[in-house]
Image: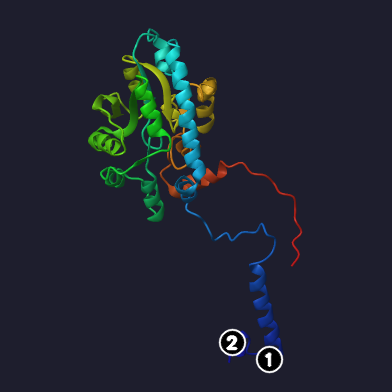
Amino acid sequence: MKLMILGKNRTRCENKVVLFCIVFLIAISGSGCSHRKCKCLQADDRALASSWMHNAVEYEYINKSTYTAAKTALIRALEDTSVSASLEQEETGGYENLPPAVILDLDETVINNGPFQGYMVKNKENYSPELWKKWSDLKDAKPLAGAIDFLDFAIANGVTPIYVSNRIAAEEDNTIENLKTIGISTTREQVLLKNEHEDWTSDKRTRREHVARQYRILLLLGDDLNDFVSVKGLNTNDRNEKSLPYINNFGDKWFILPNPSYGSWEPAVYGGHYPGEYEKEHKMRVDSLKTFVPAETNCKH
């Protein structure tokens, strides 16, 4: 009966040949050169980056190394009162006798929001203010490796930590409580969040200017280029060109921590702004990758 399905007018022998060919084609479709991949398997775009941040000890070691280097730079900057890490402060001058401070971002700089990223990946959800609030309300973000040690070191040397974060003003209480749970005591005056004042936008320049009027800014620490120089809305090339004149500040007065999960680098890939369509964003990310043309390989089956 099964052979009749293959062909009513074929002989039993012919049907056996056809069946053999079908089985053979199915078998070889999964074989071939070792570089061939199944195109139907597509990983979540953010899963690999989040997995690295969750599981790779290299991530922890990079963060610790960065903070260790920042401690050495802090002592150097304390001894030289002509030093300021703030471009805004260098423009105005007159900061030499101000009390010392360091400016740090919070998320993925001092505290780790890995569980929030993991939730979005596992549940295939995109970022939304409502979802972020559910995470923020838990006040459960843990410190990055090296962060607490650096902050204790700074305070012990008379340096005030100032946190400039793009968390919104309504999150101030939760943020301060979260910091307290991990051993960071701070005040409202030290936590400068987006929209606390009308001109405190996601561009952190105005908040750095605010700090610069009160303190000599020794170091800047963050996980995004906007934590150091304003590059909001720029495409990748313009973003790179604007930051290039300050390349020697990195590792000297500016210390950047790795964040492959999110940041201003992503909309830069799209020309400076999110297109708002997943398929279009995915295509633009793929198109931005550098590649090569491999030499032809003869596959023998």
Quarter occupied by residue 274: top left
Judged from the image, the secondary structure of the residue bearing numbered disc 2 is: helix
Counting residues from the start of the chain, the first of labels 1 and 2 encountered is 2
Which amino acid type is marked by label 2? Ile
Q: Count the marks: how many?
A: 2
Residue that label 2 marks = 5
Residue at the spot 66% in from the left edge and 82% down from the top edge: 19
Decide if residue 33 is in sight here.
yes
On residue 203, the disc is none
Q: CA distance from mark 1 to mark 2?
A: 11 Å
- The residue carrying pointer 2 sits among few (fewer than 14), some (14 to 19) or many (20 or more) residues within 10 Å by Cα, namely few
Give percent across and percent down for residue 174: 25, 38
Quadrant showing the C terminus: bottom right
- Residue 285 vertical placement versus 146 (above, below): below
Give percent across and percent down for residue 51: 47, 49
Q: Is residue 42 left or right of residue 32?
A: left
Give percent across and percent down for residue 75: 45, 19
Which amino acid type is marked by label 1? Arg
Residue at the spot 67% in from the left edge and 44% down from the top edge: 292
- The residue carrying pointer 1 sits among few (fewer than 14), some (14 to 19) or many (20 or more) residues within 10 Å by Cα, namely few
Q: How is the image coloured?
A: rainbow
Residue at the spot 59% in from the left edge and 89% down from the top edge: 2
Residue that label 1 marks = 12
